[in-house]
Image (tube, grey):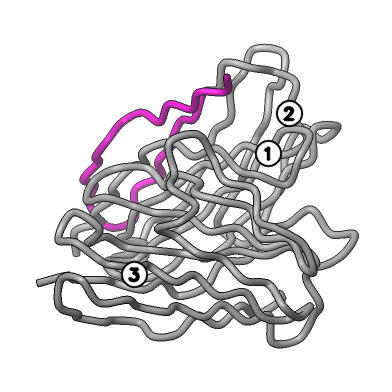
Amino acid sequence: KQEVTQIPAALSVPEGENLVLNCSFTDSAIYNLQWFRQDPGKGLTSLLLIQSSQREQTSGRLNASLDKSSGRSTLYIAASQPGDSATYLCGVQGGSEKLVFGKGTKLTVNP
Amino acid sequence: GAVVSQHPSRVICKSGTSVKIECRSLDFQATTMFWYRQFPKQSLMLMATSNEGSKATYEQGVEKDKFLINHASLTLSTLTVTSAHPEDSSFYICSANNAGDTEAFFGQGTRLTVV
């Protein structure tokens, strides 16, 4: 059974700082991994999708890496802004289209 | 990206009544949609897979008679919480993948409060 862990559970940084969020998973036989952002009381917004054959994906100030063999992914946020404050979720997809999620990292970027 | 619309965003109902939540794919067709439940400060937990034109597949521990799922068209899945109780209060979110695309898109979620 796939288990996904996200560390840290919460993170508070000053504006402008670069930061890294971590995601680990127990079963390396994945199809893809997706990073999402969730604002309080809202749904999930897809940030980056990494296929199992890929090592990283970039979108603007975001960069996600994937090391499938070690069961790890990182989300790098450059030059953080207060608007980046949200909960970031890592979702891992196996053979079916179902996603298994971690509990998320709550990020606060202070002005 | 593809758009998934979920309605209502918030609902309050009395114990014993039923509540229907809709999930629509606005600009694509989805043969499969997923329903998740999220408790405060917890991860999203998959409840069931909604299959267009056939019965839903429920995860272990999810009561199919309590959480009725209907996926009558390629753009609409509904989740009905029957005989709701306060412990059913939660945040329910649906997702769908565009055919042939592995990226999942989520609705805005529904906050259900049973009083």
Label 3, on which residue? Answer: A83
As for residue A15 lying within the magenta part, the answer is: yes
Q: Secondary structure at mark 3?
A: helix
The residues bearing labels 1 and 3 have C-alpha atoms spaced at a distance of 28 Å
| Mark 2 and mark 3 on one chain | yes
Residue B70 occupies quadrant? bottom right
Q: Give the farthest residue toward the left.
A: B115
Q: Are marks 1 and 2 in contact (CB under 8 Å)?
A: yes
Main structural element of the magenta stretch: helix, strand or loop? Answer: strand
Which residues, given as a range, are shown in magenta? A1-24
Mark 2: few/some/many CA within 10 Å (<14, 14-19, 20+):
some
Q: Are marks 1 and 3 in contact (CB under 8 Å)?
A: no
Mark 1: few/some/many CA within 10 Å (<14, 14-19, 20+):
many
As for residue B50 lying within the magenta part, the answer is: no
Question: Residue at the location (44% across, 44% down)?
Answer: B62
Q: Give me the chain letter of mark 3.
A: A
| x, y percent for residue B97 | 74, 63
Mark 2 and mark 3 lie on one chain; the one further toward the N terminus is: 2
Quarter of the image with the C terminus of chain A in it: bottom left
Quarter of the image with the N terminus of chain A in it: top right
| x, y percent for residue B3 | 65, 80
- Height in image: A64 above or below B108? above
| x, y percent for residue A73 | 58, 30
Under mark 1, the amino acid is Gln
Mark 1 and mark 3 lie on one chain; the one further toward the N terminus is: 3
Label 2, on which residue? Answer: A30
Label 1, on which residue? Answer: A93
| Mark 1 and mark 2 on one chain | yes
Q: Give me the chain letter of mark 1.
A: A
Under mark 3, the amino acid is Gly
Q: Nearer the viewer, residue A4 or A76?
A: A4
